[in-house]
Image (spheres, rainbow, N blue to C red):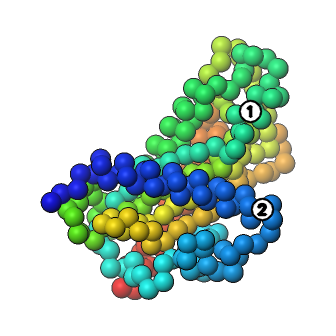
Amino acid sequence: MTIIWRNTMHKLAIALRSSALAAVVLLAACAETGPKTEAYGVSFDGLEQVTGTGFADVYKKPGVQLGEYDTFALAPCEVAFRKNWLRDQNSSRLDLTSRVTQKDVDRIKGQLSEMCTGTFREELEKAPPYKLVDEFPEGEQVLVLAPAIINLDINAPDVMSAGRSRSYTTQSGEMTLYLELKDGATGDTLARIVDRRKDFDDMRLQWTNSVSNRADAQLILNRWAKYLRDGLDEVQAGK
């Protein structure tokens, strides 16, 4: 029996959105009320912390051997802005023609999602390439990589307005990677990566637009993809 990739990804996307929402709530709670269980090496769902990686926080299910997987699938990257980002952006924009619209939000999320998915895929396909599949038979050992970008905060988004305006900032913003590694057959989360990154702040005002925002985001995505590839290479080498 074959599991069609479209249906599989639909189910995983629903689970991922729920997981990402839980992560936003958890991270916000930690920031407001102090250390929680994750600060002591165990995640909210029993995953144990792994040290010595390039990421800020990595958690793995006890007893799981990720090196047993030789086939991988990459889910489309989900993107979510930080809470009240749209409201806060428009609160300081007096010119109605420069307001950020939901259409702008959807466009930015779509572009960043494509960049994120494409960057991870490109890194995994570098020589020697990992075996990436779009569909897989039931029972086959497939490790699904489900990335999401949460708490996206762009300081000066380039809006599609008729008026001409320029925004100057010292940094483009920040975003957090929330990436889960799931068993393709069961959907169980075997590992989780959470890593917050800010654009470099050089304390000098620079003209910020869609090109500079995209370039800054790409640098962060490249770093995340390289760390993931290095981690998988290490796991595969040690199996």
Q: CA distance from mark 2 to mark 1?
A: 21 Å
Q: Position of residue 115 (x, y in %)?
A: 49, 45
Where, quadrant-wise, is the C terminus in this rendering?
A: bottom left
Which residue occupies the extreme top position in the image?
162
The kind of secondary structure element at disc 2 is helix
Image height of 21 relative to 38, above or below:
above
Question: Which picture quadrant has residue 56?
Answer: bottom right
Image height of 91 relative to 13, above or below:
above
| Category of crowding for the residue at label 1, using alpha-carbon neighbours closer than 10 angstroms: few (below 14), some (14–19), many (at least 20) | few
Q: Which residue is mark 1?
A: 87
Image height of 148 relative to 40, above or below:
above
Q: Position of residue 111 (x, y in %)?
A: 51, 38
Residue 149 got which mark? none
Amino acid found under the numbered disc labelled 1 = Arg
Q: Which residue is mark 2?
A: 31
Foreground residue among 34 and 155: 34
Q: Residue at x 80, y 61 (%)?
A: 32
| Category of crowding for the residue at label 2, using alpha-carbon neighbours closer than 10 angstroms: few (below 14), some (14–19), many (at least 20) | few
Q: Residue at x 23, y 60 (%)?
A: 136
Amino acid found under the numbered disc labelled 2 = Ala
Question: In the visual, does 186 lie left or right of 91?
Answer: left
Foreground residue among 159 and 94: 94
Q: Residue at x 30, y 66 (%)?
A: 185
Q: Residue at x 53, y 58 (%)?
A: 19
On the question of residue 76 being in view, the answer is yes
Q: Earlier in the sequence, mark 2 or mark 1?
A: 2
Where, quadrant-wise, is the N terminus in this rendering?
A: bottom left
